[in-house]
Every structure is written in C-alpha cells, then in structure tokens.
Image (cartoon, rainbow, N blue to C red):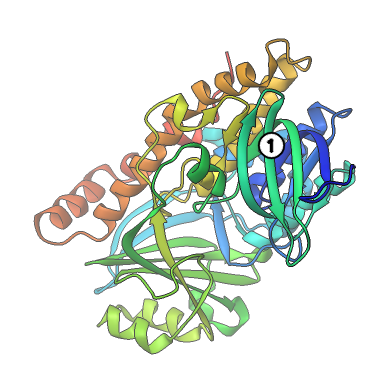
Amino acid sequence: MVADPFGPQVEADVLVAGAGIAGLAAAMVLGRQLPQASIGLLEQAEAFSEVGAGIQLGPNAVRVLYDWGLQEALHQVAAFPLLLLARDARSGSEKGRLRLGERALQRYRTPYATIHRADLHQLLLAQVRAQGIDGHLRQVLTHVELSDRGVRVGTQSGTRSGTQWQAQALVACDGVWSRVHRTLWEQPEAAFSGHLAYRGMVRMSALPSDLRRSEVVAWLGHDMHAVHYPVCAGDWLNVVVVVHGDVPAEAVGWDHVAAADALKQRLGPIARDLHRVLEAVAQWRLWPLFGRPPVRKPGDLVRGPVALMGDAGHPMRPYLAQGAAMALEDAWTLGRLLEQDAALSGGWPALLDRWARLRWKRCGWVQARSQRNGTIFHAAGPLKWGRDAAMAVLGERLMDVPRLYQGPPEPG
C-alpha cells in the first residue's frame, strides 16, 4: 500500500464489486479455483448482510449448490415444496399444478427449494470467509477504467480519502444499478417496468391450519399476481404481490416501507384464501421493478478483463423465479472454466470472453421468458382465456421448464 494524494493504492489479482448473492458466489469460486490469488471483495454497505425475503431455487440452482458441497447446509435452512399450484386471484379456482418434491428429484436429480434470501447469503458468506478472502465494506465505486495492466477501480468510504484499486480483472456484481455497467458500457440506467412488488413474511404458526402447506402458490389476476411459499425450513411463509403502478419518488433500491391499505386498493376483490394470507402479513416492503432489455450478444456481459454477473449483467423480472439462480449459474460456469484453465493461459480477457459466450444466450432467454410470464400472469380477455385453456389441457407439460431446470449447461 503506497501513499498517494488521492488515497492509498491497493493491488489485487481479481476484484469482485458487490457482496450480494452474485458477488459472494463469484468470490467463492475464485477463491476455490485460484487459492494463491489475491481477491478483493468490495461492498458499499456497512455490513456483509442481506435484507429482503424469500427466493425460489429451481433444480438448476440447487444443482449448483450441491456441486459446491453445500447440500447439508442448504437442507438446514431451506424448504422443499411438494407442489406448484396456480389459482385464480379472484375466484380462487385452480388453474394448473406442477408436482415438485419426488417428481423433481426423479426428473432433474435435484429438488426444488425455497429459501430466505438472508439464509442463502449467510451460507455463501461463510464459504467466502473460510477461504480468507479480503472483504472491504463501505466501498462506494466512484470510477472504473481499463488499463494496460487490467482494470483500475476507485472507491470512496464516507468522508475519508478514496482508494485506488488495481487488478488484472474485475467481476462486477453490483446489481441492476451497476456503476460498472453504466461506466464501461455507456448505456442508460435500468428502466422502470410499470410493476410494483409488495413483499412480506408471516410465521406459519400465525396462519390458519389449512393454509400451512408445503406449496408454492401463484395467484393470477388482471394486472396483478401474487406468490407465496415456505422459507426458513418451513417456519415462515414468504408472500409477494405484484401490481401495476407508478414509479415511487425514491425509486432506487427495492426495500421501501409499504402501506397495506395502498396494496388493498390496488387489488380490489380477491379470493378468500389469498385474502387470509395477505391479512396475516404484519408489515409490507415495496420493491419497484426495474430492468434492461435481454442481453443479445457476449459483449453485453464482458468487456476485456471486466465481466458483469447477476443483475449487473442480466437483471431479471421475478416472474420465472430465476434471478438468484442465474447469478449462481454465472459463478458456477466461471468456476468450471477455471478448473479447465487455472493457469489462465490466454489471460483474463480470453477466459471471460469464453464465459460470456457460454452464458449470454441462456441469460437472455431467461430474461425474455420472465418478461413474457409477467404478461401472461396479468392477462385479461382472450389472452387469459387462452392461458387458462392451455393450462387445463397441457397441465404439467406447460408449467414445467425442462430446458431451464436441466441446466446449467456444462462448458464444452
């Protein structure tokens, strides 16, 4: 570390920007595959923690965690629903169902899991800490630039002088509002989707006994849908309601206090079971949904020694429940490539270019499929009739997604 008028200068082999699920997963595989490398993990928050509620992990995501040796840790904190059920948000009638549980195990060799976001974050953080990776808090990115030695990153920590970081490569996992993406790709910030997600949690023991089920339930309605499922080893129910609305005054971020009355006004009449679930939620948080168009080429994810992973590269609308899964797949694929070429024979740009060529089509497809699901979930009129008829006729064949759940694809 050398004194500098602009603050200290720090050398690292690889930098990871962001210590959410994507960043921790990336740091973990880098530490495992490059045990002699210096890895700098930069996080702008005051602590390594995760807020929020639940996430769904399809068999593709669970397969990644199993491959990393985290099966036992996952089973201590996750829930494993037996059924995915689609119901009408107004009438309560069943529209379709997909068996999970044993069927998922038989078909995909790994189960379908639901987990609290903080539990997954802590699971990954424990792995990163066990590898002795340097984590640096309160590091707000101020600039990023490519250099003849790789990449230079500037950070600011409160009122202190800034820090200049020099590394061979940068893995940017700094979310949908990625400073790295905005700087190096020179593209507009994420755009508001017109959808607002209300999130809440309720103890299973606080629910009527007939609602304490090991199921993922999706309620489909006009200009809205709701989803709830167990988390925290089945002790809590995670509840999400997505409605159409205007962008809030403070749009950046996703964790805002929300009023239950505002949600009720947006929903109107709803089915009795859905009403009982929503009434049991004591506190709501608001998440304005922002995004960017699906990625269309490898260059959307990589530029020289810099790669965008997770929401920084391919932000997902939550209508296919694959945001966290794609971030885990990103890191898993990077790890596989490093297994094949730990010596980095072609340098970081070549390895990251190969990573992007393996990831962009799948990520773009999931982004597009997620966006399409939002239209289908919120349908009215002929589109709703067609959706309901297709679910009635095709059943599990329509609700299952083998192309997704059989992944992630092995690098060739």
- Residue 182 in view, yes or no: yes
Q: Residue furthest top?
A: 345
- Identify the residue shown where x is 61% and y is 36%: 145
Percent position (x, y) of residue 360? 46, 29
Percent position (x, y) of residue 246? 30, 72
Closer-to-camera residue (111/309): 309
Query: In which quadrant of the rendered view does residue 290 lie?
Result: bottom left
* Side of 302 relative to 126 (left or right): left
Percent position (x, y) of residue 144? 61, 41
- Residue 407 in view, yes or no: no
- Identify the residue shown where x is 51% and y is 28%: 359
Tell me the quadrant of the picture where the C terminus can be found: top right
Q: Residue furthest bottom?
A: 261
338 lies above or below 294: above
Q: Amino acid at mark 1?
A: Arg
- Identify the residue shown where x is 56% and y is 43%: 180
